[in-house]
Amino acid sequence: MAVSRVLHHRNTPSVNQILLCLGALLLLASVGWLQGALDLRQDRTVVQIESLAQLPKGEYLKPALLGYHHLGADMLWLRLIQVMGKKRNSEDEYEWMYHALDVLTTLDPQYAYAYYAGGVVLGDLANRPDLSNLLLEKGFKANPGVWNIPFLLGYNYYFLLGDPAKGAEFIMQAARLPEGPSYLPGLATRMAAEAGSPETALAFLEARLRETQDPEMREFLANRMKEVIIERDLRILENAVEAYRIQHQTSPATLTDLVRAGALPNLPEEPFGGDYRLDPKTGLVSSSTHPNRLRTFFKRKKPPVYLFPKIEPAYSFPRIWE
């Protein structure tokens, strides 16, 4: 009799096991129901998109999954990539897509690829860098060591929103991370220089130079510092030329005239051993060793001004899922 009691005790599942099994069955049943609804409709893609709007908020869904929230995030991602594969989505569909991504990343905050892929789709395809940035900023808080999330934020601010200063800030954060590619410091400093902040670029490069022991990287950083110094000097000289023109109602013939007139205490030294030259007709100053100004590698293909309203932090979605 004692043996039968032991066997009975061993064969009786615990309350936790029952709840976990029920949670798994509930999740599978929900997915099966959704798939069945899709099969009843001719336009499967339309239903897939509309189903995203039915998702409850991640804060409500996560406890309901009884510990299976990582599995729920995976299954939602598989559903979501089918929607992302459409050639064209409407404005509302992209908002639903953002909602689904927000739910997914609440279920699994470390789902780093979902932040990046979603950020690309919402920024470049949806032309909604506001929603892209909301998702990416959430991802950066949850994954501070993943370099490509702040990198994409920098891309959005520079190329899509026309804000090189903010773009440089995020690219610099990406460059400081251990896994960040070696080209990031150069890109960040080009952006900072174009934003009118060569001093910021120099401070960043000096910090990176102190942290880096690799000889090739140190050589690259030192060389880039000289290029940023040229950009800084050119801006100083051009401002002095403009001040001279305003004061004397004529352009200086040479840069030396700026020192004689007191517009500059002295002429800066060109860091590569060359010299700075003034075009008296245009008033533009250039370097003999680096005639091209420090700019980013790419040209913006989209206008920096968008027609959509800017989203405040407390974004209110359609009430369909609440």
Image (tube, rainbow, N blue to C red):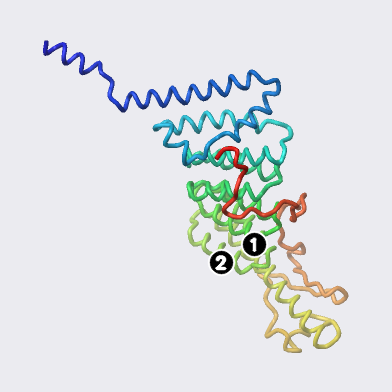
SS at mark 2 in the image: helix
Q: Which mark is residue 203?
A: 2
Does the image show residue 266?
A: yes
Crowd around label 2: few <14 · some 14–19 · many ≥20 (10 Å): few
Task: Locate residue 26 relative to residue 121 in the image: left or right.
Answer: left
Residue type at mark 2: give it: Ala
**Is the N terminus in the top left, top right, bottom left or bottom right quadrant?**
top left
SS at mark 1 in the image: helix
Task: Locate residue 159 relative to residue 109 in the image: left or right.
Answer: right
| Residue closest to the eye, 32 or 285 | 32
Rendered location of residue 321, percent (x, y): 57, 38
Does the image show residue 110?
A: no
Q: Residue at x 78, y 72 (%)?
A: 285
Distance between the alpha carbons at the discs numbered 2 and 1: 14 Å
| Residue closest to the eye, 284 or 170 | 170
Rendered location of residue 296, percent (x, y): 70, 56
| Residue closest to the eye, 266 or 40 | 40
Q: Residue furthest left?
A: 2
Crowd around label 1: few <14 · some 14–19 · many ≥20 (10 Å): many
**Is the C terminus in the top left, top right, bottom left or bottom right quadrant?**
top right
Residue type at mark 1: give it: Ala
Q: Residue at x 50, y 39 (%)?
A: 58
Rendered location of residue 147, percent (x, y): 54, 48
Which badge, 2 or 1, is on the more N-terminal residue? 1
* Front tag of 2 and 1: 1
| Residue closest to the eye, 194 or 33 | 33
Q: Which mark is residue 134?
A: none
Q: Residue at x 73, y 76 (%)?
A: 237
Rendered location of residue 64, percent (x, y): 43, 33
CB under 8 Å between callouts 2 and 1? Answer: no
Query: Which residue is the site of mark 1?
Result: 165
Task: Locate residue 48 relative to residue 177 in the image: left or right.
Answer: right
